[in-house]
Amino acid sequence: MRSSCPTIRSMSARRPRFGCRRRGPDAPGPDYAMSGVVNRLVLGDEVMDERLTALMPMLSAAPLTPHWYLAFVGTRPPARGRGLASALISAITRRCDEDGVGPYLESSNPANVPLYERHGFVFTSEVAIKGGPTVPLMWRDPQG
């Protein structure tokens, strides 16, 4: 599945049991501007300001060098344990290696850190989200 922004890709099965959302290194910074406008209209300025303020430490921790950003990697509970997330991550890291660009992610579930480590990601730091979890930040150097 391809998003309306050419630098953002979604990958999923025909009957979605797993999926991934990633952003390429050539994506312009304000590519989330339209979703921000929609969120403000739906949620209101105050709620959006609170959410963005809480997320600011995580957003400012992202690498400044060109990179692929793995925004979401997930598997529905009934489909877990089949290697689907691993297959997605492998496909993405192959693409990163071809591009010579490293992928970056924030793991919303610290239990997933070993999965990412098996694919060559290393823990770089963590960010405590105000009113939320402490999120591990991970990076993988391109291979080859």
Image (cartoon, rainbow, N blue to C red):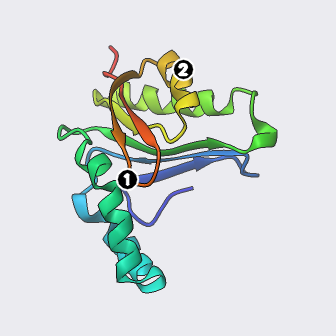
The amino acid type, in three-letter code, at marker 2 is: Pro
Q: Could you tell me which secondary element the residue under label 1 belongs to?
A: loop
Q: Which mark is residue 114?
A: 2
- The reply, left or right, for residue 63 in relation to residue 52 is left
Q: Position of residue 48 (x, y in %)?
A: 38, 73
Q: Which mark is residue 130?
A: 1
The local crowd at label 1, few if under 14, some if 14 to 19, many if 20 or more residues have their Cα within 10 Å, is some
Dividing the picture into quadrants, the one containing residue 94 is top left
The local crowd at label 2, few if under 14, some if 14 to 19, many if 20 or more residues have their Cα within 10 Å, is few
Viewer-proximal residue among 33 and 9: 33
Q: Which of disc 1 and disc 2 is earlier in sequence?
A: 2
Q: Position of residue 21 (x, y in %)?
A: 49, 49
Q: CA distance from mark 2 to mark 1?
A: 25 Å
Badges 2 and 1: C-beta atoms under 8 Å apart? no
Q: Residue furthest left?
A: 64
At horizontal 23% and vertical 58% (from top left) the residue drawn is 29
Viewer-proximal residue among 99 and 58: 58
The correct choice, above or below, for 43 with respect to 128 in the image is below
**Which quadrant of the figure contains the N terminus?**
bottom right
Q: Residue furthest front?
A: 131
